[in-house]
Amino acid sequence: MGKKLYETTGFIGALKVSPRGDLVAFADEPLAGDVSGYVRVVDRTGQTKAVSRKWSNIQGLDWAASEIVVKPRMYFVTGGRGLKAAER
């Protein structure tokens, strides 16, 4: 078994591993039965950071492909709001 990196009282979804494999982006919906939440990024040590404001509905996440990455840039799509971006 692996190491627990993050826990929520609600739901975790839309998990995406970064191209380098050192970070995981995910939608954290902290209230059970409520699809609103935050985009968070967690590293291998369990350090977690919210990288977005609260969204009413997160549809999916993806990392941008890049040969040279200074700061991973992650794109996420939100319900009815189009494409938004956040940096870790």
Image (tube, rainbow, N blue to C red):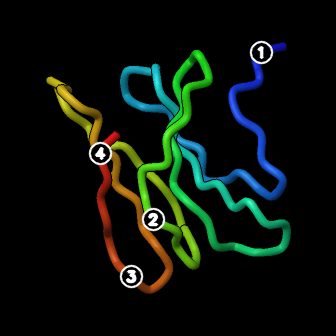
Q: Earlier in the sequence, mark 2 or mark 4?
A: 2
Indicate the quadrant containing the C terminus: top left, top right, bottom left or bottom right: top left
Q: Earlier in the sequence, mark 3 or mark 1?
A: 1
**Disc number lying in front (4 or 1):** 4
Q: Give the residue at mark 2.
A: 53
* Residue type at tag 4: Glu
Q: Earlier in the sequence, mark 3 or mark 4?
A: 3
The image's mark for residue 87 is: 4
The image's mark for residue 81 is: 3
Distance, label 2 to label 3, CA atoms, is 13 Å
Q: Earlier in the sequence, mark 2 or mark 1?
A: 1
Residues tagged 3 and 4 counted as in contact (Cβ below 8 A): no
Q: Secondary structure at mark 3?
A: loop
* Residue type at tag 1: Gly
* Residue type at tag 3: Arg
Distance, label 3 to label 1, CA atoms, is 35 Å
Q: Earlier in the sequence, mark 4 or mark 1?
A: 1
Q: Is residue 59 above or below residue 20?
A: below
* Residue type at tag 2: Arg
Q: Residue 77: x, y in percent?
A: 42, 67
Q: Residue at x 49, y 40 (%)?
A: 49
Q: Residue at x 62, y 23 (%)?
A: 46
**Disc number lying in front (2 or 3):** 2
Q: Residues within 10 Å of mark 2 (few under 14, many from 20)?
A: few
Q: Secondary structure at mark 2?
A: loop
Q: Residue at x 75, y 16 (%)?
A: 3
Q: Give the residue at mark 1.
A: 2
Q: Residue 4: x, y in percent?
A: 76, 24
Identify the residue at the far bottom of this view: 80
Distance, label 2 to label 4, CA atoms, is 12 Å
